[in-house]
Image: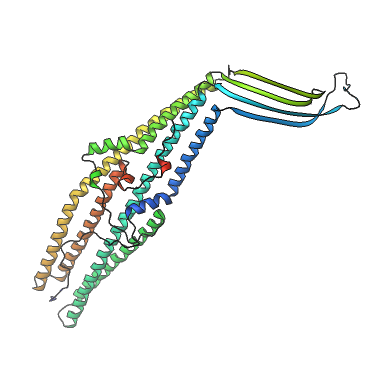
Amino acid sequence: MRVTKLVLSSCLAITPLALTPAASAISLEQSVAFAIDYSPEVLAQYSRYQSVIRDGDAAGGDRLPQVNLYAAAGVEETRYNNGNFIDPDDRRLNRTEMGVRVSQLLFDGFGTSANVKRLGYEAEAERLTLISRAENVSLDVTRTYLELLEAETLLQLANRNVLEHQEIYKDVLDKKGQGLASNSDLAQISARVATAQSSQIAAQNNLFDLKTQFLRQVGKPGSDLVLPKFDSALLPSTLDVAIQQAVDNHPEIKAAMIDMDAARQEIRREKGDYFPEVKIELHANKNRNVGNVIGPDEDMRAMLTLDYDLFNGFSTDARVESSAWRLEEARAIRVRTEREVREGTELAWNAYSMLEQQIRLLEQNVDAAKIAELGYIQQFNVGRRSLLDVLDAKVEVFLARQNYVRSKYDRTFAAYRLLNAMGVLTYALRVEHPEEWQKEGES
């Protein structure tokens, strides 16, 4: 049996979903900015950065004068070796002490200055790590944003696919009532309608899941999204250029290099214990009833002091060696980080290049599948094709469109992924870092 008419879409290809910006629309750039402010990972790293800055301030305080105030009050009792008290009638005195000491460090083997520099390097490394955290959050949000747009487009395809199958079902049902279609034709199209509806439900579920994920990352609902357009001028011309820019600019590599500088300063700090500590100390005391002498006891003195640790059980040697091994650890982390950045850049470059070629082929696939579908419909209408052939052709068109849509969004994400691998994604999205992030730690 043949059906005389099938209502099908005449469009040969489908383009990605383009939403009209509304008053409540949220762009990719806005989503990334919101997510960075909302991210607990970024907040935790910022807190870590600020903590290390304060540690550096505390270490720098050792280079300033130290002022200590001492006060005490109590009773004093003195007894000689013969057992007699100095005053049998009043053998206890009310003793008071009060003193102030001012000390200034002059030299400690450069340990304090090395420690200040070490913490300055660590603060800068934490700042760069903070920027890297923001880069990774930006990439995660970009992925979810594009997947959400893709899910909306695929749901549109699924909805249209269901409508087209339902129209065919109605037409076949009408023809069956007229004796122009068989039960097998009706069963076949019924099965295809159920399959299309199942795909529609799966597309809806995927969209709901992505909206939940977007809300968790950004803190705002993922509705009225706008199709982003990346600045292709920021993309490198070759893989070698991409890798070189990544090695030169990626904050993780810079942080790893600065960690090595911090480890070197830690070695200098530990070696400071090989030298004496020299200070100037000023003392002023105002005591009363001290040493069983009734009355005031006051003194002042200015001293140049030297404290030299001649032997401490080789503890200093062990700490210096320990610091040297931490330098080796930092060097290994630096090598590993560069390898990971190179690998990530190459993978992103390959994905972008291959998807660019794949899109052209998938576009041809959509056009060819649609032409085949229209030809099958014409042949079906003259009895040269079965209903099954037409439905199979329609499935081919639907799958071809799905693959084309996915590859379009995958290619867009691959471009953003390449920018992330180079460490410039937030720059490409024109998301400015807070002023506190842009201050380099003192070194």
Measured along the vertical axis of the image, is residue 56 above or below residue 205? above
Number of marks in the rendered image: 0
Horizontal and vertical percent for residue 207?
A: 33, 61
Taking 11 as reference, is 47 left or right? right
Measured along the vertical axis of the image, is residue 68 above or below residue 439? above
Q: Which quadrant holds the N terminus?
A: bottom left
Q: Nearer the viewer, residue 260 or 179?
A: 260
Question: What's the residue at 23%, 54% (across, down)?
Answer: 408
Question: What's the residue at 36%, 59% (across, down)?
Answer: 222
Quadrant in the picture for residue 387: bottom left
Horizontal and vertical percent for residue 225?
A: 32, 59
Horizontal and vertical percent for residue 95?
A: 79, 29
Taking 115 as reference, is 410 left or right? left
In this view, which residue lies farthest toward the right? Answer: 89
Quadrant in the picture for residue 79: top right
Taking 297 as reference, is 318 left or right? left
Horizontal and vertical percent for residue 268?
A: 47, 23
Q: Nearer the viewer, residue 159 or 191?
A: 159
Measured along the vertical axis of the image, is residue 19 above or below residue 354? below
